[in-house]
Amino acid sequence: MMDFSAQLSKYMPKDAAPIISTWINDTGCQFRISRSRRTKLGDYTSPFNGNPHRISVNHDLNPYAFLITTIHEFAHLQTWQRFKNNVKPHGAEWKQSYQELMRPFLKLPIFPSDVLQAIVVYMDNPAASSCTDLNLFRVLKTYDKNSDFPLTTVEDVAEGSIFTINGGRVFQKKEKVRKRYKCVELATNKMYLFHPVAEIVLLDDLKKRSDPSAQATG
């Protein structure tokens, strides 16, 4: 049995690492620290063609987000062990597994009070991703490392603001539709729906960062 605690402690709270290490050993899971992915924080792949359970989690998450995402993916693994593919990916069975696996960590002194409170609320009805719960997502984001760019979120900028996303595409924020914001891509005039806490960079902020002389002087 290998002890992965030392490696895991680089990415998650130290006291949580031995528990995750035990899970990896007990399940024979192939656990991988992944590159950053814009579309997901982590993923789970069930065994097939002789391959073991596989879990990957993005390397650049803050320690609390990394741990929560890891628990999320192990809940998928446990659900598969119990029900195979006979239940919905984030149905009642997965939610029960997530709640069971999270409870031991709530007894450890590893979460700041605001993160702990947000997790407790989230556990009443866990969702497909921690990003889906806006309160938990916002609290976790406060513990991210400072970015090289002046990041903000779609919900925090005024309607009509022009912004860019990773990849360089430029959009203008429009009105809110139910839970998301309509944003038009200026190059194509196509309309897209953005999650309220999608990370963006205001074009004016980007220009100021790249050209300090462009900032107004009093």
Image: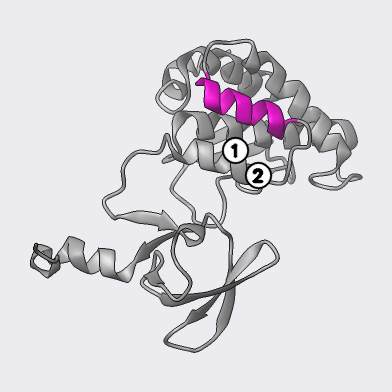
**Drawn side of residue 185 relative to residue 162, left or right:** right
Residue labelled with disc 1: 136
Q: Quadrant of the N terminus?
A: top right
Can residue 36 be seen here? The reply is yes
Identify the residue at image location x=68%, y=40%: 51
Q: Amino acid at mark 1?
A: Leu
Indicate whether 95 appears above or below 196.
above
Q: Is residue 72 above or below residue 107?
A: below
Which residue bears the numbered disc 2? Answer: 133
Q: Nearer the viewer, residue 45 or 11?
A: 11
Apparent side of residue 55 relative to residue 146 in the rendered image (left or right)? right
Magenta range is 111-123
Residue lying at the far front of the rendered structure: 218
Using the rendered view, name the quadrant where residue 204 is placed: bottom left
Q: Residue 161's image quarter?
A: bottom left
Residue 85, percent from left and from top:
86, 45
